[in-house]
């Protein structure tokens, strides 16, 4: 009886080992291939100076020392690891500028994620300081949930968030934590 159990156990172990051996496919090869084309950038460009237009009207100028193109990914994006200088033109031809240490532009959503020492200066010299700011190109909208300092000619406002259209006609600091009025 114990000889039969021993043979049955050996058969089960052999069957299990054979099943495991044949169930393995080229997973190692697939993992190695992930390192190749699908995760490598499609292109790398230096000294970028791109102008965006809408119906023949200049809407933005993007300048950056380096752009890495990852549009070969499932969720395509462009990365600007060495900083970005973005000039946004309002309907009235006013110029607003944004600089940041790092940026990512998502192709499918037309969203730009600006990060690190973000400084936004409006045509009227109002200035926003934050660590992260999003620019929705479709809606011409700027927003963040990060702490901000917003300086105008009349006051400095600190808060936890910012929301504005591209022309800054309705710019507002969210969750105001302090305001200093400037006397001239």
Image (cartoon, rainbow, N blue to C red):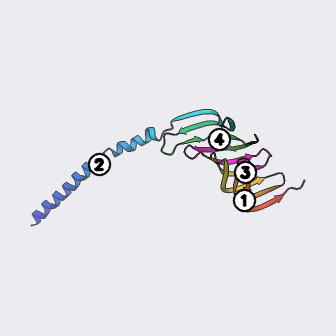
Query: Going by the image, does 32 lie left or right of 59?
Result: left
Residue 63 seen in the current view? no
- The disc, 1 or 4, on the residue closer to the chain's N-terminal end is 4
Let me know if residue 124 is in the magenta part. yes
* Residue at figure coordinates x 53%, y 34% from the top left: 43
Question: What is the distance, in whole Å, between disc 2 and disc 1 at their CAs?
Answer: 55 Å
Q: Position of residue 12 (x, y in %)?
A: 18, 58
| Tag 2 residue | 24
Q: What secondary structure do most residues of the magenta stretch adopt? A: strand
> How far separated are the C-alphas under marks 3 and 2?
54 Å
Of labels 2 and 4, earlier in sequence is 2
Please name the residue that numbered disc 3 is placed on. Answer: 129
Q: Give the structural element (helix, strand or loop) at label 2.
A: loop
What is the spatial separation of the Cα atoms under label 3 and label 1, in whole angstroms?
11 Å
Label 1 – label 4 distance at C-alpha: 25 Å
Q: For marks 4 and 3, give the CA distance.
A: 16 Å
């Amino acid at each position: 009886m114990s000889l039969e159990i021993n043979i049955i156990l050996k058969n089960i172990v052999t069957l299990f080992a054979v099943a495991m051996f044949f169930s393995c496919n080229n997973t190692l090869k697939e993992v190695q291939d992930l390192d190749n084309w699908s995760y490598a950038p499609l292109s790398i460009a230096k000294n970028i100076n791109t102008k965006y237009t809408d119906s023949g009207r200049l809407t933005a100028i993007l300048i950056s020392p380096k752009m890495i193109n990852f549009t070969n990914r499932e969720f395509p994006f462009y990365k600007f690891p060495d900083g970005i200088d973005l000039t946004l033109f309002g309907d009235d031809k006013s110029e607003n500028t944004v600089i940041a240490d790092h940026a990512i532009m998502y192709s499918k959503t037309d969203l730009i994620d600006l990060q690190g020492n973000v400084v936004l200066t409006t045509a009227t010299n109002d200035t926003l300081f934050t660590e992260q700011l999003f620019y929705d190109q479709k809606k011409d909208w700027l927003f963040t949930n990060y702490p901000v300092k917003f300086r105008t000619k009349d006051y400095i406002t600190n808060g936890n968030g910012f929301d504005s259209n591209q022309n800054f006609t309705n710019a507002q600091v969210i969750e105001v934590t302090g305001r200093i009025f400037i006397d001239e």
